[in-house]
Amino acid sequence: MKIKQICLVSVAGILLSACGLMGPTYSEPSLNSPQAWRSSDQISQVESTNLAQLAWWKQFNDAKLNQLIESALSNNNNLQMAMGNVLQAQASLRKVNMGWVPTVALGAGGMTGQSFNPSFTNLSGYPALNNVNTSTQGFDGYGVGIIPSYTLNVFSQIKQGEIAKLNLALQKQATNAVRLGVISQVASSYFTLLGLQKQLALQQQILADAQEMRHYTQIQYDNGSVSDFNLAALDQYIAGVVGNIPSLKANITQTENALQVLTNNNPGKIITQNTFDQIKPDGIVPVNLPSSVLKQRPDIIAAEYQLQIANGNIGAVTAQFFPTISLTGMLGQGSMQLNNLFSAGGDFWATQLGVGMPLFNLGLYAEIDKAKAGYYSAYYNYIQNVRSAFSQVDDGLASHDSLNQNAIQQKVALNKAQSLYTIAQKQYQQGTLSYANTLGLKLNIDYAQSNANQVKIQQMNSLVNLYQVLGGGYQVESQLTQVKKFGDGHDI
């Protein structure tokens, strides 16, 4: 059969079977999404704001926080690893696209040997052939040229291209997810650092007031107005306060080191500019509806890309049932020399066309079942990610609102403690209350401030978490995450 006829038969076969080879058509899973959040937050407000482009951390007007986040977006190692995955996906897509282009190789070959025909007899009637050497004849030859080849399963190539594009989009969303996490980790660590610094100062104030109270209690004991039981109780209390200070200092060091790692620096102190008192957690928090969260959260978007890739894999395996066209040729120069007979040489070309398709391959059916099982797993992974996202946002709203209410009550407790101390000071001035007892009420203020500070740390962390689960801020200053250059031959 001629090459042209083979091509026509192959194309006809492909077209006749084109209806089902691409695999199942992808359709977005149907979700029974909530229309609103179950939990409420008194300082949150549902808006249509694109939270992914909202630089929410800048509302605190803290230059150090802004600088740390910018540094992390530029230098964080996890982000650079994610960028490396994007580069690999881009290269894979280019490789798949190059599958449409024939490959060309340079080839060369040679041969040598001998032939013999000892029984040669001249029966032709031509006397000139009586002189032919009937013993042995040597021969050698060579060929050199370029070898273009082309092997293509059209529909498999199409599906592989689709999958490569989806994988590239998936890796970009994975980078966005890392960026979102880095922003949240930096902000949370920074607020925790400021809070711990304030907590250490409060603990040292508690210690100073307790030691002063111990001093005046000793005077009372010397005068016989109190027993040694009071002194022993104060000594126990002071020991506990002193014991808390090294732990706070260690936590500060660990938090500073965590920030240094996030910004790709060696362990070291973080020089802060603002105090924790200057960080105000009040203000309206923009919140999107559940349907918007699905479109903003990079992990949800990535999970759907995984589902689309799994669906594409079914089509890619199915496409192996259809014809693969192979076209191979050679263009070059060669010669053949046969000793004692003749010499020949010159340019030449040759081509070969082949078409093949599976006739009996039960393994392909198993591969299709495997691909369908992968889709099954990816489907429920997507559903699980969506449900978890909804739950995380709802939990975040509930936690943030609860801590806001707690912070309000801690302020009330602090105001009460300050009022009692004011009354105690007046009683001391009037001589109706000892100074040691007045210091006891001063310690109440210290404790109220310490409790309020601890709640504020939790409050700020819950705010950061709320923005993270809503997918806030990861598109801001995304240009800071650039591929680094090695300058040693490893660069892309």
Image (cartoon, helix red, strand yellow):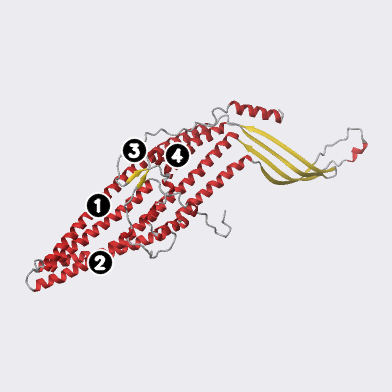
* Among the two numbered marks 4 and 2 on one chain, the one whose residue lies closer to the N terminus: 2
What secondary structure is marked by label 4? helix
Closer to us: 482 or 198:
198
Count of labels shown? 4
- Of circles 4 and 1, which is in front? 1
Q: Measure the C-alpha gap from mark 4 to mark 1.
A: 41 Å
Whole-percent x and y of residue 235?
16, 67
Disc sitting over residue 304 in the figure:
4
Q: Measure the C-alpha gap from mark 1 to mark 3.
A: 26 Å
Question: Can you see residue 422?
Answer: yes
Kindly identify the amino acid type of the residue bearing the numbered disc 3: Ala
What secondary structure is marked by label 1? helix
* Contact? badges 3 and 2 (CB < 8 Å): no
Q: Measure the C-alpha gap from mark 1 to mark 2.
A: 25 Å
Kindly identify the amino acid type of the residue bearing the numbered disc 2: Gln
Q: Measure the C-alpha gap from mark 3 to mark 2.
A: 46 Å
* Among the two numbered marks 4 and 1 on one chain, the one whose residue lies closer to the N terminus: 4
Disc sitting over residue 204 in the figure:
2
Crowd rating for badge 1 (residues with CA inside 10 Å; few <14, some 14–19, many 20+): few
Kindly identify the amino acid type of the residue bearing the numbered disc 4: Glu
**Residue identified by numbered label 1:** 408
- Of circles 4 and 2, which is in front? 2
Whole-percent x and y of residue 192?
33, 58
- Quadrant position of the N terminus in the picture: top right
Kindly identify the amino acid type of the residue bearing the numbered disc 1: Ile
Looking at the image, the residue that sits furthest to the right is: 127
Disc sitting over residue 36 in the figure:
3
* Among the two numbered marks 3 and 4 on one chain, the one whose residue lies closer to the N terminus: 3
Q: In the shown orientation, is residue 22 left or right of residue 123?
A: left
